[in-house]
Image: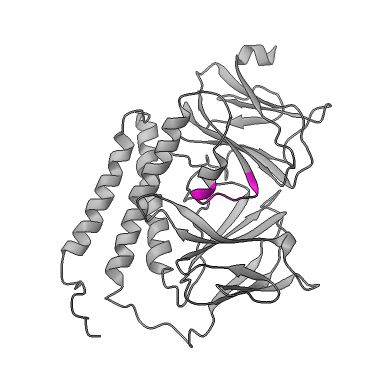
Amino acid sequence: MMTKPGAQRLSDIEIWERYCDTLKRAGQQIFRPGAPTSDFDRAEGFRYLTRLIRIALEMHVEHGDPDFPTFMHPSHETGKIGSDNPDNVYLSARLDGRHEYRVSGQRGEAVVLNFATKKGGYANRDCRMGGSGFLDATQMQFAADGSFKLILSQRPHPGNWLPMDADTNQLLIRETFLDRNTQRPARIRIERIGAGAQPQPLDPEKFPAMLERAGNFVENTARIFADWALNSRRKVNELIAADQAELQASGGDPNIYYYLGYWSLAEDEALVVDVERIPDCDFWNFQVNNFWMESLDYRYHRIHLNKRSASCNARGGVTMIVAHRDPGLPNWLETTGHRVGMINFRWIGAREHVQPTTRVVRLAELRG
């Protein structure tokens, strides 16, 4: 394949060195002022960077062709971004807003399913990921067997249609489950309409830009969520209603009302989170994260509760306990060796957002 005049040549080692230099700068986030300094937290920070590298290469290189898009998981059990929801399955595909796409599949058993077209993203310095279209499953038409078809385009289409802009570059799908171990996920496919039979071999002229986006994604993602953690540290052990517009501008779900907080507990302390009453809603959950805003390891530890898994009290509310050791009470959440981190609470589809309250007590008081 001939190289166009003025295009970067892969014989230029600078392309690779620039990518490596970007990753090197990303490592500075682990040592930024205010970040935890224990060997444990720093080890998690460096592991976090390796996870971001894997996600970035999958997103922008392996699944980076908008002419022949394929789905990847932008957050999962061993790769986590921005207080990832342990009750979610996330899917992402690269798009080009100048084209049209067809998404099809089977509904599955998620209690919440939605589709969002996005523009921008964490490969850009400002980390803005604005929406160009949003469609919830409650607004869609499904066949009796749960099958569906959805068109993504700038011009309107009859039936299930998700708008795009000329600069749309991503489809993000969220499936939310009450129990991911037992509920069946959706089966979803995507294709660009009129793309042709099969993709061409890797284009050496496009690869430098793909690699550059992958490096920028790692650096910017590490920076923005460390910023959020340090901003939350101004009020420790509280859940504060987040700036919902800011979160949505960074890719958040417009159906969710978010609370964020920074937690810090001594060995003999517990954080008690009370929700006076649970209003009618599609879903709610509460989770414990590390400083880097990764959910703690929910494969092996109980680090989150939701509408189904939590034990409510006689008043219709819920009390949850974050502690280093089991206090022998319902709704205990583990800290898995951490002393500091982030917490967050979500309401989905709630007409009323009841403010969670928090207090720090001694473990001995709880046992008493």
Q: Is residue 249 magenta?
A: yes
Task: State how the image is colored.
Answer: one colour
23 horizontally vs 321: left or right: left
Question: Is 81 within the magenta?
Answer: no
> Which residue is drawn at the image coordinates 35% and 35% (left, top)?
42
Q: Where does the image place residue 18, in percent across and percent down from the top left? A: 21, 57
Residue 277 appears in the figure: yes
Q: Where is residue 50 shown, x and y percent of the image? A: 36, 50
State the image quarter where residue 211 is shown. bottom left
- The reply, left or right, for residue 94 in relation to residue 220 is right
* Nearest the eye: 51 or 204: 204
Q: Position of residue 329 (x, y in %)?
A: 71, 24
Identify the residue at horizontal 33%, vertical 49% (top origin). Answer: 219
Q: Quadrant of residue 193?
A: bottom right
Question: Magenta span: helix, strand or loop, mainly?
Answer: loop
In this picture, residue 54 sits left or right of residue 256: left
Seen in the picture, residue 207 relative to 134 is either above or below; the reply is below
Q: Position of residue 134 (x, y in %)?
A: 61, 60
Residue that extends furthest to the front in the rendered view of this protein: 155
Q: Tell which residue pokes out farthest to the bottom in this image.
A: 197
- Front residue of this view, candidates 268 and 277: 277
The answer to whether residue 83 is visible is no
**Magenta-drawn segment:** 248-256
User: Which corner quadrant holds the C terminus?
Assistant: top right
